[in-house]
Image (tube, rainbow, N blue to C red):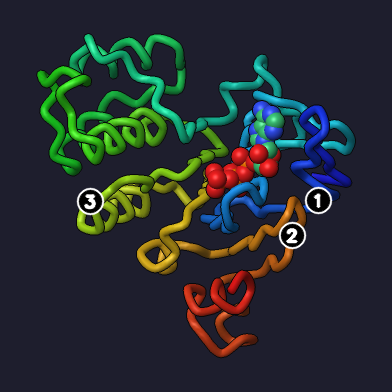
Amino acid sequence: MQGIHKKYLLKQAINGIDLQVQKGRIVGLLGPNGSGKSTLLKMMAGLIYPTSGTIAVNGRVPDVRNKHHVAYLPELDHLYGWMTVKETLRFVSSFHQDWQPEKAAAMLQALELDENQKVRNLSKGLRARLKLVLVLSRQVPLILLDEPFSGIDPSSRAKIIRSIISEFQAEEQTIILSTHSINESEPMFDDVIFLQQGRIRLFDTAESLREEYGCSLENLWEKVYG
Ligand SMILES: Nc1ncnc2c1ncn2[C@@H]1O[C@H](COP(=O)(O)OP(=O)(O)OP(=O)(O)O)[C@@H](O)[C@H]1O
């Protein structure tokens, strides 16, 4: 991203961002409500466009025509309640040539999802797990996860994090993940971006940040935003 600004009518959501993310990393995108996390992820997914500046994902401008290069998990739910888990997988897989059925089956089992259950009968946590299966079953270079843990209990979070780590293919993929659950997700991050009011406040490897500030990322959150 180079010189990225994004304005929604009168609201300046992103205020000049330059960012380069290396392939093979799991990147935590952190920031308080309204700091611009979802806006950044949507621009990377090609769902909305910057007001100014340029973005490239693997050398390509992200837009709807390039969506086979990016898997995006939105913050809001996009599933049909009348479908079963199995039907949902079949439906979503029909849009993606890069779908990996064996991976989807393995994740269903690991995340204890019943493929015959209706989506509307899934609890919030199980729904979140299903959303993750839909994204991680694709063979794409860039995976964007917007708040994958919102409303999920700590043990489910831990399970989901284990699943993200075990399904991640570091040679071929990059994950950028926004979250407020810094405590549980800290061990997963290679790099961390701290956003504030549409600008990057800090961006470095998790290791360097911990060393430089002499504390965990969770405590650093308090220092940056407290
Ligand atoms: N469609 C929109 N129209 C107008 N303003 C918007 C729109 N979407 C986001 N905004 C504003 O842009 C700013 C950044 O919002 P964004 O959703 O990117 O933040 P966020 O960091 O993801 O927040 P949260 O943690 O609450 O999800 C906020 O002030 C928000 O109100």
Q: Which of marks 2 and 1 is nearer the N terminus?
A: 1
Compared to residue 5, the image places residue 139 above or below, namely: above
Residue 213 is drawn in which quadrant? bottom right
Q: How far apart are marks 2 and 3 (CA)?
A: 30 Å
Q: How far apart are marks 2 and 1 (CA)?
A: 7 Å
How many neighbours does mark 3 have within 10 angstroms: few (below 14), some (14-19), or many (20 or more)?
Answer: some
* Amino acid type assigned to the residue bearing label 2 in the image: Ile
Q: Determine whether the residue tagged by mark 3 lies in a helix, strand or loop.
A: helix
Residue at which label 3 appears = 156
Instruction: Give the x, y percent position of residue 128.
Output: 31, 37
Compared to residue 202, the image places residue 103 above or below, namely: above
Residue at which label 1 appears = 17
Residue at which label 2 appears = 200
Q: Which of marks 2 and 3 is nearer the N terminus?
A: 3
Instruction: Give the x, y percent position of residue 83.
Output: 23, 11
* Amino acid type assigned to the residue bearing label 1 in the image: Ile
